[in-house]
């Protein structure tokens, strides 16, 4: 086993000891073999069966992921010589290993090895410490054979993660703990749980004692560059300990031997770009601080993938990922680690004109290396080297890597080469896409029709035909042929009905699809939107709750969930949902405005002030007149003036400083042309007993009203509005003017004169136009009243 001779392990296993396959299913056959050797149920027998399962899993991975070639088929071990029986068993295994209506890739080779591994590990139970650990690995491999993620396998993996951690006593084995935590992180990453994945990676890093940081160093990237610029580099160092030497294998802490096999690594050979960064100083050039443990290199690659999963898809993200890959490729101590590093580098280089050629050629070389035979070719790593850290990497299968190569060809416009690969892999959806790009829609349809002629009962093919024709009848046929188990057909129907505004049918279709495989975040989201449009609030809540459970950073789902909560009078839940949405979309003013309204409604005035500040920050320079909700601002100020208790029964007065800052530093520092804002501010100043500032604010309110109603000499409504402001301002003069300042002098000693001048000025502007209007008469009466007193 340790030498990687997994086929020899299988040939000597008691499971295959003179036992020909003659059962209804492979799982039944394994049970029959277990029963047959029950009388030999010694510890050695149990351990031998465990090694059988591990060897079968590793052989399956070797055939479909890592290479090199294997000359032993599962049919040979089962003594199945009849080709029809072999095909029948393969078809049965395709069905048995499919989960939640997600099919297994039909051209996967020697599927029986995986089925035996799963079946044996299931029956070994708790007899050995690492059974659950290997069962999790086998289950994760099964998931990677399926078209989409499935809820059933996700739950199974979660259960195995817990039981394996408990059973293996990880606190007592540091190297095993690191692997367990890293593999858990990779599972989370595969299912899109990026935050959980990152947390587990940090745990694994801490367990390993691995230290790294992203930093900068001066250097040049091109041959003709005359000045140095800061380049991103990874500063990384493994903890040198006995435990870690076990994790790293023979290469731990030392430079890789020149004789060690390496995957084919292509040079850039560009006339401008350097092969690697030329650092200015020797110190910067040696940022790596020596070689890294193999497990730490796996960790670094995992962190690199997390950068991609948690950031937008643009150039800055690529630039941040490059140092991770470069650091690993400097001293890749393991064949598969080197392979994964080259694959990630190939992906990163696919977006640049000077590196795109090497990107495609390197990917082709990685595809070809799986087919190499270690016994026939020099410089090829054996199975043990390739598999020693395979489970610590998220390496794609050989057909996925070939699909990636074909899609790379598509991006380069080499459609014919891509088409050949897709046809060989029998990935018919990609074949159809290629023909559509070649503007041969009829040919695409003919391909699917020919396949249907050979297999008229294929739900997947009918679904693809439905996608081509946009015909709901074909999706329904696909659903019926599958025995109402092919969820993709219902997802397509749901999308069709949503576009046709038949939202109840849309909900019905998505409900059927998601009851089979609930891990489709987009389907839950569309279902929730449809439910909102027909006011089926219970369905909407369930849908958006599932969205945020699958992706806690889906801001729009949180916002929609809050909207439903608000409509169903669950205000506090709406408030909490909007707080989460605002964290995720910090620059979306609509979400902040929704939070502002609901925060005031539930008495969360501190959050309301913060939300109003964000709305003003985001909108004041675009729609100044609409940046402040005056009614809400009035309520915020009143909560302090009238000392309203908040939701926690705390006094409103405690927020007076925050209200003052909101008014002066956030709003009035930007928006000075709103008379209503000045009026609200004046009322706040009166409460603070700042009478001078209060009167000044009302004067500014009147001037803002004059400016806002510049047509008051020709428009009666404008004049009426200004007249109201004028009379209010005079009232403020009369109320505040005689009051004393702290030094004993009046606030406005000539308040009567100022009031008269204000009224005379306004009346003079409209004397010949609106002198017979009620507003003019009110101004005249107020002026006469001031003269009389």
Image: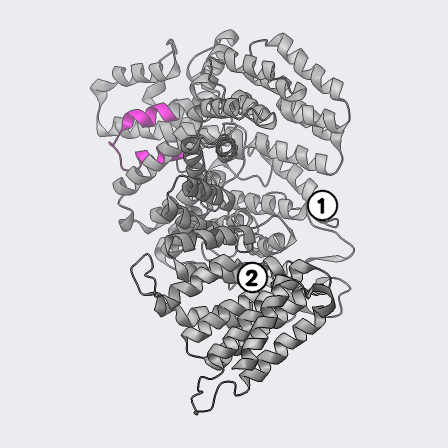
Q: Circle 2 sits on which residue?
A: 616
39 to the left or right of 718: left
Whether residue 531 is situated above or below residue 572 in the rendered picture: above
Q: Please tell me whether mark 2 or mark 1 is closer to you in this view.
A: 2
Whether residue 680 is situated above or below residue 533 in the rendered picture: below
For residue 633, say whether it is visible: yes
- Residue drawn at x 44%, y 20% as measured from the top left: 112
Please state the horizontal and vertical placement of residue 173, each as a whole percent of the image: 30, 49
Crowd rating for badge 2 (residues with CA inside 10 Å; few <14, some 14–19, many 20+): many
For residue 284, say whether it is visible: no
Report the number of numbered marks. Answer: 2
Please state the horizontal and vertical placement of residue 368, each as a whole percent of the image: 63, 34
Q: Is most of the magenta stretch helix, strand or loop?
A: helix
Q: Quadrant of residue 143?
A: top left
Q: Circle 1 sits on which residue?
A: 356
Whether residue 596 is situated above or below residue 337 in the rendered picture: below
419 to the left or right of 244: right
- Residue drawn at x 55%, y 73% as measured from the top left: 729
Q: Is residue 101 magenta?
A: no
Q: Quadrant of residue 363?
A: top right
In primary-sequence order, the first of circles 2 and 1 is: 1
128 to the left or right of 717: left
Q: How far is disc 2 from disc 1 in space, using C-alphas?
A: 45 Å
Q: 674 or 174, which is in the foreground?
A: 674
Crowd rating for badge 1 (residues with CA inside 10 Å; few <14, some 14–19, many 20+): some
Q: Which residues are magenta?
A: 118-138
Quadrant (top left/top right/bottom left/bottom right) for the N terminus: top left
Q: Quadrant of residue 264?
A: top right
Q: Secondary structure at mark 2?
A: helix
Q: 661 or 342, which is in the foreground?
A: 661
Q: Is residue 133 magenta?
A: yes
Q: Which mark is residue 371?
A: none
């Amino acid at each position: 086993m340790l030498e990687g001779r997994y086929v020899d392990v299988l040939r000597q296993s008691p499971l295959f000891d003179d036992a020909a396959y003659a059962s209804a299913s492979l799982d039944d056959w394994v049970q029959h073999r277990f029963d047959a050797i029950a009388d030999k149920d010694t510890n050695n027998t149990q351990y031998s069966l465990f090694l059988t399962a591990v060897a079968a899993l590793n052989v399956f991975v070797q055939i479909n992921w890592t290479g090199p070639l294997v000359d032993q088929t599962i049919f040979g071990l089962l003594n199945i010589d009849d080709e029809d029986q072999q095909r029948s068993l393969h078809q049965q295994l395709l069905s048995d290993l499919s989960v939640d209506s997600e099919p297994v890739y039909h051209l996967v080779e020697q599927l029986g090895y995986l089925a035996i591994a799963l079946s044996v590990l299931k029956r070994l139970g708790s007899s050995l410490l690492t059974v659950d650990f290997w069962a999790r690995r086998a289950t994760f491999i099964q998931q990677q054979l399926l078209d989409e993620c499935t809820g059933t396998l996700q739950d199974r993996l979660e259960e195995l993660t817990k039981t394996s951690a408990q059973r293996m006593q990880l606190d007592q084995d540091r190297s095993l703990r690191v692997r367990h935590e890293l593999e858990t992180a990779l599972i989370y990453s595969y299912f899109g749980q990026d935050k959980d994945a990152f947390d587990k990676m940090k745990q694994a890093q801490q367990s390993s004692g691995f230290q790294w940081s992203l930093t900068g160093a001066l250097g040049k990237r091109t041959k003709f560059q005359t000045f140095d610029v800061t380049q991103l580099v990874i500063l990384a160092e493994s903890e040198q300990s006995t435990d870690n030497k076990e994790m790293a294998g023979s290469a731990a802490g030392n430079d890789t031997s020149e004789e060690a096999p390496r995957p084919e690594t292509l040079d850039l050979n560009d006339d401008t770009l350097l092969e690697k960064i030329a650092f200015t100083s020797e110190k910067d050039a040696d940022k790596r601080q020596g070689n890294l443990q193999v497990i730490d290199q796996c960790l670094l690659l995992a962190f690199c993938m997390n950068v991609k999963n948690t950031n937008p898809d643009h150039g800055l993200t690529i630039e941040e990922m490059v140092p991770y890959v470069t650091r690993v490729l400097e001293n890749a101590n393991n064949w598969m680690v080197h392979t994964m590093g080259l694959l990630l580098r190939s992906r990163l280089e696919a977006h640049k004109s000077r590196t795109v050629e090497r990107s495609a050629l390197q990917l082709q070389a990685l595809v070809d290396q799986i087919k190499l035979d270690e016994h026939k070719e020099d410089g090829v790593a054996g199975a043990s080297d390739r598999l020693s850290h395979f489970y610590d990497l998220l390496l794609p299968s050989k057909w996925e890597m070939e699909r990636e190569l074909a899609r790379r060809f598509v991006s380069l416009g080499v459609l014919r080469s891509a088409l050949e690969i897709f046809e060989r892999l029998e990935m018919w959806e990609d074949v159809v896409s290629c023909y559509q790009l070649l503007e041969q829609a009829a040919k695409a349809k003919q391909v699917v029709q020919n396949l249907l002629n050979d297999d008229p009962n294929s739900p997947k093919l009918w679904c693809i035909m439905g996608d081509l024709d946009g015909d709901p009848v074909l999706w329904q046929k696909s659903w019926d042929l599958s025995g109402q188990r092919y969820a993709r057909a219902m997802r397509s129907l749901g999308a069709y009905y949503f576009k046709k505004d038949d939202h109840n049918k849309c909900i019905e279709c998505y409900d059927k699809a998601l009851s089979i495989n609930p891990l489709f975040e987009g389907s839950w989201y569309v279902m929730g939107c449809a439910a909102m449009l027909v006011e089926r609030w219970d369905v909407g809540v369930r849908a958006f709750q599932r969205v945020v459970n699958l992706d806690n950073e889906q801001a729009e789902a949180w916002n929609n969930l809050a909207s439903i909560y608000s409509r169903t009078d669950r205000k506090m839940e709406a408030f909490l949902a909007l707080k989460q949405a605002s964290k995720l979309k910090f620059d979306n003013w609509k979400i902040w405005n929704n939070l502002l309204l609901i925060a005031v409604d539930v008495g969360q005035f501190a959050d309301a002030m913060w939300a109003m500040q964000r709305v003003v920050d985001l909108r004041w320079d675009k729609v100044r007149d609409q940046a402040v909700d005056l009614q809400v601002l009035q309520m915020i100020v009143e909560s302090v003036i009238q000392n309203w208790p908040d939701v926690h029964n705390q006094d409103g007065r405690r927020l007076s400083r925050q209200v003052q800052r909101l008014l002066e530093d956030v709003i009035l520092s930007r928006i000075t042309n709103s008379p209503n804002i000045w009026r609200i501010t004046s009322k706040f100043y009166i409460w603070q007993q700042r009478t001078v500032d209060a009167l000044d604010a009302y004067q500014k309110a009147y001037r803002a009203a004059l400016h806002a109603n510049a047509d008051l000499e020709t428009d009666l409504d404008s004049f009426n509005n200004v007249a109201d402001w004028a009379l209010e301002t005079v009232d403020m003069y009369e109320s505040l003017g005689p009051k004393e300042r702290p030094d004993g002098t009046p606030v406005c000693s000539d308040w009567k004169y100022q009031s008269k001048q204000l009224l005379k000025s306004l009346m003079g502007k409209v004397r010949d136009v609106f002198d017979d209007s009620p507003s003019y008469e009110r101004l005249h009466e107020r002026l006469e009243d001031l003269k009389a007193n």
